[in-house]
Amino acid sequence: MQVGIVGVGLIGGSMAVDLKRRGFADQVVGVENDALHAVAARDLGLVDEIVSYEECIATSDIIVVAVPVSVAIRMIPDMLDRVDRQIVTDVCSTKEKINEVVRYHPHRKNFVAAHPMAGTEYSGPWAALPGLFDGKAGIICNPEDSDLQAVELIRQMYDCLNMRVIFMRAAHHDVHTAYVSHISHITSFALALTVLEKEKNEKNIFDLASGGFSSTVRLAKSNPDMWAPIFSQNRENILTVLETYIEKLHEFRQQIAQYDEDGLKQLIYKANKIKRIIR
Amino acid sequence: MQVGIVGVGLIGGSMAVDLKRRGFADQVVGVENDALHAVAARDLGLVDEIVSYEECIATSDIIVVAVPVSVAIRMIPDMLDRVDRQIVTDVCSTKEKINEVVRYHPHRKNFVAAHPMAGTEYSGPWAALPGLFDGKAGIICNPEDSDLQAVELIRQMYDCLNMRVIFMRAAHHDVHTAYVSHISHITSFALALTVLEKEKNEKNIFDLASGGFSSTVRLAKSNPDMWAPIFSQNRENILTVLETYIEKLHEFRQQIAQYDEDGLKQLIYKANKIKRIIR
């Protein structure tokens, strides 16, 4: 079996490594637009070979689209124009809009909409990590729109990555990711901007930043080319979450302004319930 | 040398352990209001003995006040009423208000205002960790208001905890901690409240939460009794930071609402500058 990875960055590169070393793929080829990334992907041994987009589609059994969602949304329909037996799958963090553009495609059944929920704040082939997906959730959306064998093969691929496979409606997926992934990125970006604006003397941040700040601001290192399109494509859900989030901040602001320590304790006590969910 | 720890929780307990095992203190006694915490602190071996508040003050060379800042602000003046040769120091996350209440105390020079910038989101004696302070910043505020030997002894104590000692004005300290510590807690608490309100079905959060969410929401597990008073005592600085933070969120909201991907990329690119500071 040959797996083709289009976009050999953090996600594509990590998949490539594990699918090869764990024996799911005999051959892994990569397509990489960025010349520097292409050289790195080969030199780091993430893929066996860098090939052209056309060759990748023609020779692979499974093609994984691992590019920013703004690129994927144009690429996937084009790819489906070119396939017959091949299975196309993606890794994008929003699913509803992708689902819409392929809904009536004659080869819709060759496409399995998926989202392996793993990552780090780094990007590019240098960020690829063996074992990145172990134990994480691998979402497959609207499986009834895909060929049964295609879904089964992608499920096996996720099994090989040690992911917990979850089936979900694309629309639900986008609501949930807005809450448990997208908003976290916005809160981190905004925190970084706030602190950078104030602390012109960078040394103070470095000296005083304890583990708590580093952990909260970690996602602010994430890649603009990946995240801007996600926010844009999941616009409605994210705006709803952001509204609620800003309301919660206003509650804190009001109680701090009023020196209302009991009110603050109540808010924090409620927030502490997250303990039961996140260990 | 005997060190007395008033409040044997995460911070007090972690200090107690390292000061004893690294030989700075021959004897470490603890004062603990909470009966369960007192038993745990002794059983876990954090302190040699649990003693009364009065005995701790009478017999210790250094007394570390490791209680919530709302308690400390009343306790420190009372303690200074009772000391002659003993040195009193604290660990509180806000310094300006404490500084005010002791400013004209006849034993002001026996007090060293300090803040070891380390911690975790857990609390109580069970959360105490050997090595918690290694490599972190230990702030000593307004050292000129303290006896020179007292400052030197507390510096040595922080040396023993492997902290990088930094001297700072109390007012500056409170501005910086608002930016690099207090605001992170508010953003995490608000994130937890937002997600908990929406995701009534807790299983979905658990299934989908990847490392990014866990990291961003981690501080939301923090203790209400510790944090509500900090927010209240550092009111002005926190309100200023919160204002800027909410403005940044409005920028994101506006650009998402307008599908302005280039604008979003610019914002994220600016936020990425935090990379140069936080590794």
Image: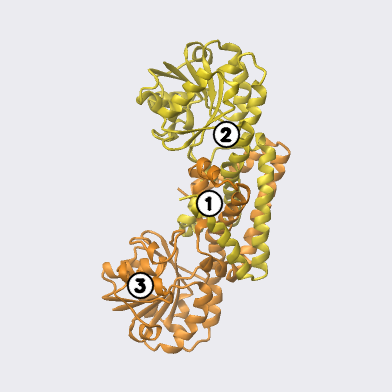
Chain colours: A yellow, B orange
How far across and down, in percent of the image, does residue B87 sit? 39, 81
Q: Could you tell me if the residues under marks 3 and 2 are in contact, i.e. CB atoms within 8 Å?
A: no
Q: Residue B39: which numbered mark, if any? A: 3
The residue at 38%/63% (across/down) is B126
User: Mark 3 belongs to which amino acid?
Assistant: Val
Q: Most extreme residue toward the right, as rendered?
A: B258
Query: On the rendered structure, is A12 left or right of A80?
Result: left
Please give the label number shown on residue A93.
Answer: 2
Say which quarter of the image contains residue A256: bottom right
Q: Residue at x 65, y 40 (%)?
A: B264
Chain under numbered label 2: A
Q: Chain of mark 3?
A: B
Q: In the rendered image of this protein, does residue A201 appear above or below residue B140? A: above
Q: From this view, report whether residue B3 is shown above or below residue A116.
A: below
From the image, tell me which residue sits under label 1. Answer: B217
Residue A120 in the image, given as x and y percentages of width and height: 48, 40
The quadrant of the picture occupied by the N terminus of chain A is top left
